[in-house]
Image (tube, rainbow, N blue to C red):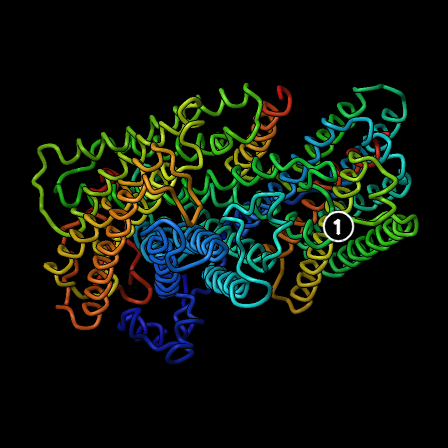
Amino acid sequence: MQTAHSANEANYLTYKGKYKGLLGWIFSTDHKRIGLLYLYSILTMFSVGVLLGLAMKFELLAPGKTIMEAQTYNSAFTVHGVIMIFMVVIPGLPAVFGNIMLPIMIGAKDVAFPKLNLLSWWLYVLGVILVLAALMFGSGAPDTGWTFYAPYSFKSGTNLLPAVFGAFVLGFSSILTGLNFLVTIHRLRCPGMKWTKMPLFVWTLYGTAWIQLLATPVVGITLVLVALERMFGIGVFDPALGGDPVLYQHLFWIYSHPAVYVMILPAMGAISEIIPTFSQKQIFGYKAIIASTMAIAFVGYLVWGHHMFTAGMSGTAQYYFSLLTFIVAIPSAIKVFNWISTMYKGSINVQTPLYWAASFVFVFLIGGLSGLVLGALATDIYVHDTAFVVAHFHYIVFGGTGFAFFAAAHYWFPKIYGRMYDKGWANTGWLVFFIGFLALYTPMFYLGMMGMPRRYYDYLDEFHSGNILSTFGSWIMVTGLVIIVVNLVRSARKGEPAEMNPWHSKTLEWTVSSPPPVENFDELPVIAEDDGPYNYK
Amino acid sequence: MSEEKHHIVPYRVYIIVLLALLALTFASIGITSIELGEYTVAGALIFACIKSFLVLTYFMHLKYDKKYIRAMVVFVFVIFVVMIVITFLDYLYR
Amino acid sequence: MENNANGEHVHYDAEASKIGMWLFIFTELLLFGGLFLIYSVYRFKNPEAFHLAAEELNTSIGALNTVLLLISSMTIAMSTTTLLLKKKGATLGLLAITIIIGIVFLVNKYFEWGVKFDHGIWPGSEHLLNDFSQGEILFFGLYFVMTGLHALHIIIGLAIIVAAIIRIRKGTVHENRAALLENAGLYWHLVDLIWIFLFPLFYLIT
């Protein structure tokens, strides 16, 4: 046992295992190292996606061709979508902060299946390579949009097969992560950590994991069918052979709608950790947040058709999907009320994570309310496939998940690296980013309502001023991003050493040293019978 | 890890279940060879459901497992049925 | 919970493995669930054509394969009992029978597909596209995809059983650490479960 003991003295960043250097990371089964592997790979792909987004915005600076041809633009938004959805936002919070924090938060030494966890990351890398191969080799980058809609997805002459297989492999990686988290939460909670005492971030990861598990295989088989359709012409989605392309959309959204809850639920969980910490108060309505989390996960599974209001569904189905869509808004609103009530009469400690969390609530509110416009049948027909939709989902996916990701990054940074970032630069970065974000996406609401369609490299002159503002916004936002990332990278190496619990948080990850030791706990923590959630001694 | 308890299922149970499954298989072949029109599929599916219930309960040990695993299995089947019903809201009324 | 020299866990939690396997089975069920959903929609839209096309399939081979899979399900279920009763020889014997039956199933499937290919029926074949209605094309498309995917799962299941046999022989799977064998069994029953639905939907709707 002596070796194990000495291993426990080093923290997870510095310990020496079987392998040294880079190999010690890419073959490590330590959940915290795997989380960081995800962080670095996701940030890499994120920057590729951001560059593509910048290029698209530059193209839209003026009507007509600015820097790229129509076909290049089609590939740009396809690849931007595939990268951002499948490689950044879906794995984002669960695979990075879930991996690093989940076991510590429930008082475990690791996830239930550490090797499977490592396999998930390897599959992620394989998926990324496959999709990038589609870009660089063969007959041109895919141009179908990230949705791979039939029948164009098997008529398009571009190199779609590797992209589809890549998305399938990424889905498999996501399933394994979800499976691992579910078993971990069921089996590895420390003594006394009852279900009703788990931190809310863990609860949202639990709901997320179920969605990953039950929804991802549906898109998996759908993508396999698209691939088979391309290779053999089985006819399943080909209208020329009797197939129904609308059925493809059903199957695609049976996954991809719940997938937006995979993106947003852990984001809500992170916000539910941050707001009480910086309000120095107990979270308001702990059980209401749990109930609304599970309600969102469940009802979110049943509303996929609101992406298809103009696709030719039956009227009955449209009414049903519209009604349920409005019902999903209720649990989301419950959460917002809970966050605001938590801050009410709190002793608010204004720090960078709170700026991010507060702006999250703001943009999430706008994104959510604009979602109701799209969930209503009559207005959706008017704004469907316009810039309005693009603005809406960027407010939710980027404004929601993205802001929460940076909130979580600034919140857990001192725990992960054992160092504190420069708070002044962090706040500046947030402000610049926030202004850029609003300038980038808000004009698109207006442009969409005026009738500017999405996914075109060109537009009418009347949309020019809105697009100029939007493109300027993209430059400001990227400036903010650079400030944030440079500050964090610099601080990870040279920042001031951080205390064990700089924010006076209540959860278990703040009871271990920063950065955490290899096995998290020398002795498993025990939660006493009369301790409530966020009240462990 | 000595606390885990294994329920050892006697051979007899497995043999009885197998015989029941075989009987149901032949019954479903028999039933569907009769001309029942649109009820053929319904008949075949009812037999398949009974068979899968037997497999899940005895072969897959759900009868002897903790209750929450059973609850999960039921939940997954419910989700799947709901998924089909909702999709048919489209196809039935189109 | 103990640690080895690398700081990795060396713990054994049979219930965790079991839940893990069940959760994996759920994803497999929904993978096939997507296909069953497609099947039900197209059957609803083309009842006549599905009826006609199903006549092409050989019910006897389908029934034979059903019986085989059910028997193999029993043998692998029994092997858990024998392992827990510490009858290693009987366990290995039952697993061997399971594997043989699985291979026979695949051989049957091979001949069944072969007959279809001889008749010029395969996805995208000219005979299929020119001489059959759209509903029948869909039926055969789904038939090949679903039975093909099922056969792939049989192969995966066989691989897991082989892994269990090797571990039992090495002695790392025994009456106190039976999780691998139990999971191999669960997976094999999943394959059986899917076939229980595939069989009537493709062979018995004539």
- Residue A35 in view here: no
Q: Is residue A368 left or right of residue C134?
A: left
| Above or below: residue B80 compared with residue A458 | above
Q: Position of residue C51 (x, y in %)?
A: 84, 29
Q: Position of residue A307 (x, y in %)?
A: 48, 34
Quadrant holding the N terminus of chain C: bottom left
Q: Is residue A215 left or right of residue C54?
A: left
> How many marks do you count on the picture?
1
* Residue at the disc numbered 1: C148
| Above or below: residue A523 compared with residue B30 | below
Question: Which chain is mark 1 on?
Answer: C
In the depicted view, which residue is nearer to us: A376 or C35? A376
Quadrant holding the C terminus of chain C: top right
Q: Secondary structure at mark 1?
A: helix
Q: Position of residue A379 (x, y in %)?
A: 40, 25
- Residue A29 in view here: yes
Q: Quadrant of residue A417?
A: bottom left
